[in-house]
Amino acid sequence: MAKRSRENFIFAAIFLLGAFVRVYRFGSLPCGLNQDEAFAAYDAWALLRFGTDSALKAWPVYLTAWGSGMNALESYLLIPLFALLGTKTWVIRLPQLLLSLVSLWAAYRLGRRMAGERAGLLFLGALALCPWHIAMSRWALESNLAPGLLLLGLCCFLRGLEQPRFLPLAGLLYGLSLYAYSAIWPVMPLLLGLLLLVYRPRFDRHLLSAGLILAALALPLMAFLAVNYGRIGEFSLGPFTVPRLVELRREDISLTRIPQNLSNLLALLLARSDGLLWNSPPPFGLFYPVSLPLGLLGLGALAKRLVRALKERRREPAAALLLWVLAGLALCLLIPVNANRMNFLLLPLVLCAAFGAETLLTLLGRYARAGAAVLAAVYLGFFGMFAANYFGPYGDMLREDFTDGVREALALALKQEGTVYVTRAVHDPKVLLEAGLSPAAFQATVEYEIYPAPYLSARRFDRFVFCEDKNMPRDPEGVYVLWAGTDVSPWEALGCTVERVGVFQVLWKPR
């Protein structure tokens, strides 16, 4: 009983620490709004209010968004939240936060199933304190829903081997992950095929139901590919649209770039950074330095367990983690990677480091408790430095990338009459979201810089005009949202009021 109480206390302490670092100042750090967050939010609002996305597609299985498309699950999750809570920034980020917190619990359950209670706590600790996962949890990039869904799907699959009623839930979660991130489509059959080949679940109504659920979710996306490769025309499935995009990014997946992709992946993992400030908080990067050797140890131990299990023809729960890593590596060979594009691989690699820690403690034998104390001290030391930086200087470093104050600046500009001239640093969906412009009004008035294009950029729509700051026209009746560093003396000479909001300046001439 005393041991169980101690383990429960450790679990609660780690989980609460992980939750705190994700919830503290949530919605305001990162400050501002990312352009993909804004587009997912605008499409959710448009679907809620008008039943179409920004491209006037009714309930699309894949959003048109920038022209080359955007994953739809985030927007669909936001619809009920917007109906209840409005479109505040913290609401936009809420699905990612909630799934990330559930992922902490799922990591604990997975580790416990694979190697016992200590491993469960190590899995929980590795994910709870991981810089990549903390940063990912705090803003709403739609593709970052995929790792959590895949983790939950794996937990349900392994539980379903013993209690088959969980298999349909695994099929549902794996199917939903397809709507979270399209890049994983080519390797999902590989992952699921490996799981079925290695674990050979008994074919019964539960497994059949799981397959049917997964197929029902996958078929609309297969039809979407057929539409966008020109095999069939755009069509509707009941209320849902299988849309044709402006352009399809066919070049994202390539067999010819495998050597270069492998080189880039290795460089990224060794550097522990993809060079993108919002993904890899410097100086800590995606994960702490100690995680890399532990991860290699974990991979070796997992491979040994898989080989032994295959020889003995028995099920080894820990082998599933290695199968996930193998499928993730296959994906990273096919696409140019950064942290977002390789999120399919990053989460199992973090858990491999935890399995490496479990392996190390097992090797230490009677010194395992001392080893665990040293590991905890090392991780908590790195975490303490990371948290001090994340909630201190790092927040200021993100202000420009997340356009701090963009919603407030646009709200102030919208109170004024006349044409609103907006710096190109502000992307179209941020204006659409703040202005509450209907998709019909947007499509009726939008003029693009280049059309068609895989990344559409509006020149103007409604009363909004987008320009580079240095090329802004001098309209005495206009309202301006400019970058903070722009010289505004010409407008001040015209008698304009200037108000600083975040990293922007809002200018207008009082009437």
Image (cartoon, rainbow, N blue to C red):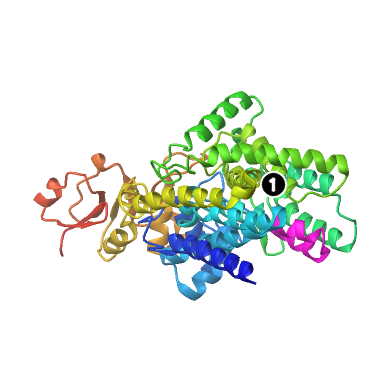
State whether residue 161 is above or below residue 308.
Answer: below
Judge whether residue 219 is colored magenta: no
Q: Nearer the viewer, residue 315 or 90?
A: 315
How far across and down, in percent of the image, does residue 123 sit?
A: 60, 53
User: Overall secondary structure of the magenta stretch?
Assistant: helix
Bin the neighbour count of mark 1 within 10 Å (Cα to Cα): few under 14, some 14-19, many 20 and up. Answer: many
Residue at left 26%, top 59%? 418
Amino acid at pointer 1 = Leu
Range covered by the magenta-colored residues = 154-173
- Residue 193 seen in the current view: yes
Residue at left 21%, top 44%? 486
Q: Nearer the viewer, residue 326 or 452?
A: 326
How far across and down, in percent of the image, does residue 139 sit?
A: 46, 56
Q: Residue at the far bottom: name it.
A: 84
Q: Residue at the far front: name it.
A: 366
State whether residue 85 is above or below residue 457.
Answer: below
Q: Which residue is mark 1?
A: 321
